[in-house]
Image: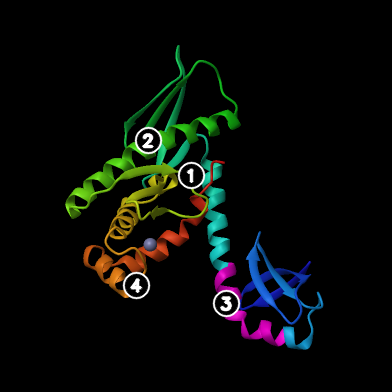
């Protein structure tokens, strides 16, 4: 495989043939994908690539970090999971009924009638987390909504593919259940963000001013949120 050396990083790349007169770059599956008109690197393409080195380096490194976090998380399954930004132990036990309990914030206890395989355990964890997430996120949202004295029509906890949350013109708020795996400060930020869309239904300057009033460090939190993207769909 061809590799590109940028600073200390060896970046594998693949070239694809694309639309006329276009060149595009994308980082995906641990590779840089270069799409050029000819499907090869012509002089102009190489020059373009040279100019984009900083971008490639930054994004490749970011994706590498996410991949490491993702792998670490999966290695800890099924004995530990992420919950509200912390690692929580799961104690698997055989019992007369299928039952689970959240003993403390740092300890889940799961009883099953028979020994489960890794895949079954993973599926069970997902079900447990979805239930707990729904309970926790709804409670947090209700709490913050009353602090802000905002009326929400309906709250739904869903499994969105890329968003942490959304807000509709009908005053319905959707939150992604995976949000409950993140540190509470990020959970709160997303909830404030969506609730404040009830007042400003866009991302105008006005809206960000409003956000800043309640979450002064929202820019830092936005960045941290994007670093957690790997969490979405991790148990699928
Ligand atoms: Zn928004």
Q: CA distance from mark 3 to mark 2?
A: 39 Å
Q: CA distance from mark 1 to mark 4?
A: 27 Å
Q: Nearer the viewer, mark 3 or mark 4?
A: 4
**Residue 90 coordinates in the image, percent (x, y):** 44, 32
Q: For mark 2, what is the residue?
A: 132
The disc, 3 or 1, on the residue closer to the chain's N-terminal end is 3
Q: CA distance from mark 3 to mark 4?
A: 27 Å
Q: Nearer the viewer, mark 1 or mark 4?
A: 4
Left or right of residue 190, residue 163 in this image: right
Q: CA distance from mark 3 to mark 1?
A: 31 Å
Q: For mark 1, what is the residue?
A: 159
Query: Is 120 a magenta residue?
Result: no
Q: Does the image show residue 116? A: yes
Closest to the observer: 102 or 170? 170
> Secondary structure beneath disc 2?
helix
Q: Nearer the viewer, mark 2 or mark 4?
A: 4
Q: Is mark 1 within 8 Å of ligand 1?
A: no
Q: Residue 7's quadrant in the figure? A: bottom right
Left or right of residue 120, residue 14 in this image: right
Q: Looking at the rendered structure, which numbered label has been put on residue 55?
A: 3
* Residue occupying image coordinates x 45% and y 14%: 95
**Does 2 appear above or below 107?**
below
* Residue occupying image coordinates x 72% and y 69%: 13
Q: Does the image show residue 216? A: no
Task: Report the magenta residues as a range.
Answer: 46-60
Q: For mark 4, what is the residue?
A: 204
Q: Nearer the viewer, mark 3 or mark 2?
A: 2
Q: CA distance from mark 1 to mark 2?
A: 14 Å
**Does 32 appear above or below 47?**
above
The disc, 3 or 4, on the residue closer to the chain's N-terminal end is 3
């Amino acid at each position: 495989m061809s590799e590109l050396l940028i600073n200390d990083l060896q970046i594998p790349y693949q070239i694809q043939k694309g639309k006329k007169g276009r060149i595009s770059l994308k980082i995906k599956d641990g590779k840089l994908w270069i799409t050029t008109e000819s499907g090869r690197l012509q002089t102009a393409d190489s020059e373009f690539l040279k100019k984009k080195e900083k971008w490639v380096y930054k994004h490749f490194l970011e994706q590498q970090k996410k991949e490491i976090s993702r792998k670490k998380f999966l290695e800890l399954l099924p004995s530990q999971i992420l919950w509200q930004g912390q690692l929580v132990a799961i104690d698997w036990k055989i019992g007369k009924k299928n039952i689970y309990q959240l003993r403390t914030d740092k300890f889940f206890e799961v009883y099953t009638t028979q020994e489960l395989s890794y895949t079954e355990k993973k599926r069970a964890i997902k079900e447990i987390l979805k239930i707990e997430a729904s309970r926790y996120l709804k409670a947090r949202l209700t709490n913050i909504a009353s602090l802000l004295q905002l009326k929400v029509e309906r709250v739904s906890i869903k499994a969105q593919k890329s968003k942490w949350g959304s807000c509709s013109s009908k005053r319905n708020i959707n939150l992604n259940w995976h949000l409950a795996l993140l540190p509470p400060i990020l959970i709160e930020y997303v909830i404030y963000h969506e609730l404040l869309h009830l007042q400003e239904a866009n991302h105008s300057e006005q809206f960000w001013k409003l956000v800043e009033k309640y979450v002064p460090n929202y820019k830092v939190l936005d960045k941290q949120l994007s670093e957690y993207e790997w969490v979405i769909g991790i148990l699928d």
